[in-house]
Image (tube, rainbow, N blue to C red):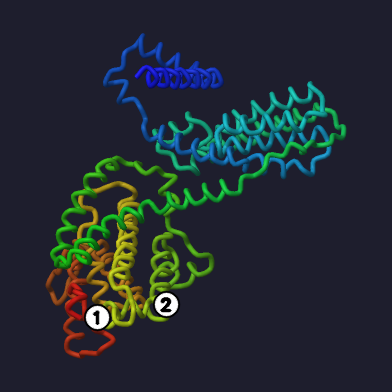
Amino acid sequence: MPLAFCIFHKEQNHMVKRILQYFRRETVLSAALVCALLSFLLTPPSDIHLQGIDTTTLLMLFSLMTIVAGFRRMGALDAVSRKLTRCVTTLRGLSAVMVALCFVLSMLVTNDVALLTLVPLTLLLFRAGGQKSTIWTVVLETVAANLGSMVTPIGNPQNLYLYTSGRLTALDFLTLLAPYAAVALALLLALCLLLPKERVAVDTSARAPLARKMLTLYGALSALALLAAFGAGVLGSLIYAILTVSFKANQNVTGLTLTIFGTGIANLFGSNYTTSGALGEGVMSVFKSVSIPGLSNLPYVGKLLFSYNSFVYFGVVLCIVLGIYINHTSQGRSLRAVGENPAAADAMGVNVTLYKYVHILLGGGICALGGAYVIIVTCNGLWTYNCINGLGWIAVALVIFSTWNPAKAIFGAYLFGAFRGMGYKLQNTVISLLGMKITFSSQLLDMVPYVATIVVLVIITMRKKKENQPPAWLSRSYFREER
C-alpha cells in the first residue's frame, strides 16, 4: 500500500506540473480564465445570463477553429504562404504580399488564426530584411487581419453573432462591407511603399513539411461530416434490417411501426429548428435553385427542366446511376436475383443476408436525403410539425407507379410533382362550366398520385407482363433451411 500510494502521489504531482506548464504557456487563455472567474464571483449567473448565450455562434466558432487548427497543425497554411512568396524578390513586394495574404486569410480563418500563422512566417522570411522592416510589416499585418476579418461572417466571433442575430445573407454581409474593405486594403498596400525597394533573398530553408497523411485524414473527416445526415437514415434502416432480415419479422408491420417511431423522433429533434433562420441563410443559399446557363432559357422546357436546386439534379443523376447498377452490373443482377428468388441466389453463392443489409441501409440513407430536401427546400429550413405529411407514402406509390424501374421513376417524379404543384396553384380556384361553378380542392388533387398508383396496379395485374411485375419475394422473409 505505501508503495502504491507513493506511485499515485508521484503521478498526481506530475499531472499538476503539466497542467501548470500548460497554463504558463497559454498566457492568453489563462488571463481569460481568470477574468471569467472574477466576473463569475462579482456577478453570479442567472437565468437571464444563460438565455443570453448564443449557442449557435459558439458551435460555429468551435467548428471553425477546430478545422483551422487541423490545417495549421499539418502545415497546409504555411505551405500555401511559401508558394505565394516564392517569386517575390524585393522587400517592399514581400511586405505587400504578406499584408495582402493576411488580409484575405483573415476573412476565411479569423484574424487571430491568420496572425498566428503568418507572423512567425514573416519573422522567418524577413530575417535578412532588418528589424525596422520586420516590425513595420508585422504592424501592417495586425491591422490587415482586423480589417480583413470584418468582411465575412466567419472573420471573427462578433461577425458570427451579427450574422446569426441579424439574419443576414452572406451576400448581404459581403456587399455591405466590401467597399470599406477595398479602401482599407488599398491604404495598407500604399503604406507598404514606405519600405525600401531593395532586393532580399527569401529564406525558405526552415521549410515546415506538409503533413500529407494529416491532410488525407482531415479530408476524410470532412467527408464523414457531410455524410452525417445520410448516416442518420442508415441508422433507422438498420433497425428495420435487423428486425426483418435477422429476426424474420413481418416486413409490413415493421415498416408501419418504424414510420410512427420515426415521426416521433423527427418531431423531437426537429423542435430545435422551429425558429426562422435556424439553419442560417448561408446554409440555405447553397440549396437555392440553380439555372443551367443556356438550357434554362429554352422556351417552355427551360424553367420546367433546368431551373432546380442541387437536390433535384442529384436525384436525377442518382436514378440514372442506380438504373445502370441494377440492370448492367453483376452485383445489380445478384440483387435482382435476391428479390426474385433468394433460394436460387443463395445456391449460386450470393450472400443473401449481406445483400439485403447493404441495400436496405443504402436505401435508408437515400430516404434520409429526401427528408433533408423537405426541410431545407420545401420548408425553407424551418421545421414544421409533421412536415413530411405523407410524402414517404408518395415515394412508395412512385416505386409502384414506375414498376420498380429507376428510369421510369424520373418521369413519375415529375408527374407526381406536377400534380402536387397544381394543388398549390389551383386550390380554391373557381371556374364556370356549363353554367355551374366548380371549385378546385387541393385535397382532391393530392389524391391524384394515389389514384394513379391504383390504376397502374390494376393495369399491371391485368396485363401480367413479367418486366412490370414487382419482385416475387417482396415483403416475404427468406428461411435458408427451407430452400
The spot of residue 436 in percent (x, y) is 12, 72
Q: Residues within 10 Å of mark 2 (few under 14, many from 20)?
A: some
**Amino acid bearing label 2:** Ile
Q: Quadrant of residue 41?
A: top left
Which callout, 2 or 1, points at the residue further toward the start of the chain? 2
Can residue 423 be seen at all in this image of the molecule?
yes
Secondary structure of the residue carrying numbered label 2: helix
Marks 2 and 1, Cα distance to the nearest angstrom?
25 Å
| Total numbered labels placed on residues in the image | 2
Q: Quadrant of the N terminus?
A: top left
Dot 1 corresponds to which residue? 343
Q: Is residue 399 above or below residue 282?
A: below
Relative to 253, residue 30 above or below: above
| Residue type, numbered disc 1 | Ala
Tell me where residue 206 appears, x and y as whole percent.
74, 36
Single out the mark in the foreground, 2 or 1. 1
Residue 340 % position (x, y): 26, 81
Residue denoted by label 2: 324
Label 1 neighbour load within 10 Å: few <14, some 14-19, many 20+: some
Q: Is residue 217 left or right of residue 355?
A: right
Label 1: state its secondary structure: helix
Q: Looking at the picture, how far across and down is residue 476, in whole percent? A: 18, 74
Q: Left or right of 460: which side holds 181?
A: right
Q: In the rendered view, does 292 fall on the left or right side of 432?
A: right
The answer to which of 96 and 432 lies nearer the viewer is 96
- Pick the residue in front: 261 or 75: 75
Relative horizontal placement of residue 21, taking residue 145 as reference (left or right): left
